[in-house]
Amino acid sequence: MSDYQHILLAVDFSEQCLFVAEKAKALANKYHAKLSIIHVLDNIPMPDTNYGVVIPLDQDSLDGLLGAEKAKLMTIADHLDVNLENRWMIWGIPKDEIINIADKEQVDLIVVGSHGRHGLALLLGSTANSILHHAKCDVLAVRL
Ligand code: AMP
């Protein structure tokens, strides 16, 4: 196994995501690698879009939802000691945005759970599977 320099941890805030997070942290320590963390907002409606189902949300409730997601990310990132500039929260499709950031930030290892919120019925969830097939770098799917 090569020496990793930049590890990207993808968290979906499922029950087991802390287990995945600890694995990523242990690997970052082992390789003295930079650790980044990403959460993709795929369950909060994006404001100002021209497509999709319009869910009536006033700005306060949207801010509340966003704030809650941000707080979850910050708690995990603080716990893992991830630098502020290496924390990502992005709207979109998880597999696409995770791969995008991995490319842009020259990540050499992506760490995901084998399944999460979307894939309990599958051996390998759809996000994990897709990242495994499309990422240009190594991918570790932590068995859950
Ligand atoms: P899934 O394939 O969707 O069941 O999820 C497998 C893994 O992909 C999860 O354990 C996370 O590591 C990652 N993942 C899924 N959804 C997201 C998301 N919205 N943001 C960041 N990572 C995610």
Image (spheres, rainbow, N blue to C red):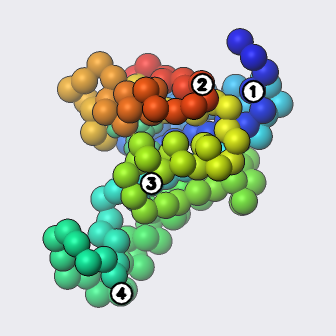
Mark 2: C-beta under 8 Å from nearest atom of ligand 1: no
Amino acid found under the numbered disc labelled 4: Gln
Residue named by callout 3: 40
Q: Nearer the viewer, mark 2 or mark 4?
A: 2
Amino acid found under the numbered disc labelled 1: Tyr
Question: Who is closer to the viewer here, 53 or 13?
Answer: 53
Q: Which label belongs to residue 4?
A: 1
User: Dot 1, crowdedness within 10 Å: few (<14), some or many (≥20)?
Assistant: some
Q: Is residue 133 left or right of residue 79?
A: left
Mark 2 / mark 3, whichever is N-terminal: 3
Tell me where residue 74 appears, x and y as whole percent.
59, 58
Amino acid found under the numbered disc labelled 2: Asp
Mark 3: C-beta under 8 Å from nearest atom of ligand 1: yes
Q: Which label belongs to residue 77?
A: none
Estimate the spatial distance between the alpha carbons at disc 4 and disc 1, rounded to whole Å.
41 Å
Q: Which quadrant of the rendered structure holds the N terminus?
A: top right
Q: Are marks 2 and 1 in contact (CB under 8 Å)?
A: yes
Residue named by callout 4: 59
| Residue at horizontal 37 percent and vertical 52 percent from the top | 93
Q: Is residue 76 left or right of residue 40?
A: right
Q: Are marks 2 and 4 in contact (CB under 8 Å)?
A: no
Mark 3 / mark 1, whichever is N-terminal: 1
Amino acid found under the numbered disc labelled 3: Val
- Does dot 4 land on a helix, a strand or a loop? helix
- Does dot 3 land on a helix, a strand or a loop? strand
Residue named by callout 2: 138
| Residue at horizontal 42 percent and vertical 43 percent from the top | 95
